Image (cartoon, rainbow, N blue to C red):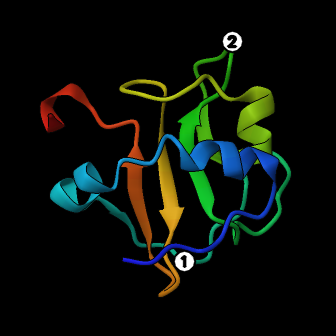
Amino acid sequence: MEAKAPTNKIEISLVTKENWEKAQEVRCFWWDDNCKCDICKKQLSGRHMIDGKLRNSFEFGLMCASCHNTVGDGFGEGKGQLYTHLIDGQWIMTFGFSENEF
């Protein structure tokens, strides 16, 4: 699997969180390829997308890496999952796996 290149400093820092071994084992894909960030409303076309919880809230949403950095509540079960954009257009979960996936 080949992923898109990072598009900014935040995505570059998130590359270190990606767990490709676990991603290929779990194979959890996000199938909607026409996603927009629920915060800034921009098309999600960079390397990362986060399906996660908003900080100090009970709300969840899709976020670009920049918005997640500002308003997201982290990664892991009940917080958020990091999806990495593959060059074939698919999104695969690469971080934030639940405990039962280990």
Question: Is 4 displayed left or right of 102 in the figure?
Answer: right
Q: Position of residue 97 (x, y in %)?
A: 31, 37
Picture layout, residue 99 above or below residue 30: above
Tell me the quadrant of the picture where the C terminus can be found: top left
Answer left or right for 68 relative to 80: right
Residue 4 to residue 28: above or below: below
Q: Residue at x 69, y 51 (%)?
A: 12
Which numbered circle lies on residue 6? none
Q: Residue at x 25, y 54 (%)?
A: 21
**Quarter holding the N terminus?**
bottom left
What amino acid is found at the position of numbered circle 2 in the picture? Asn
User: Marks 1 and 2: CB-CB under 8 Å?
Assistant: no
User: Where is residue 62 shown, x and y percent of the image?
Assistant: 62, 49
Callout 1: 10 Å neighbours few (<14), some, many (20+)? few
- The Cα atoms of the two marked residues, 1 and 2, are separated by 29 Å
How packed mark 2 is, by other alpha carbons closer than 10 Å (few <14, some 14-19, many 20 or more), is few
Q: Position of residue 74 (x, y in %)?
A: 57, 25
- As drawn, the residue found furthest toward the bottom would be 88
User: Which quadrant of the structure image shows residue 52?
Assistant: top right
In the rendered view, tell whether residue 30 sits above or below residue 80: below
Res 93 quadrant in image: bottom left
Which residue does the image show at 41% across and 24% down from the upper left? 78
Mark 1: amino acid: Asp
Residue 64 seen in the current view:
no
Q: Secondary structure at mark 2?
A: loop
Looking at the rendered structure, the number of numbered marks drawn on it comes to 2
Question: x and y percent of residue 68 in the render?
Answer: 71, 37
Visible in this render: residue 16? Answer: yes
Nearest the viewer among 42 and 13 is 13
Of residues 82 and 21, the one drawn nearer to the viewer in this rendering: 21
Read off the residue under disc 1.
33
Q: Which residue is labeled 2 in the image?
A: 56
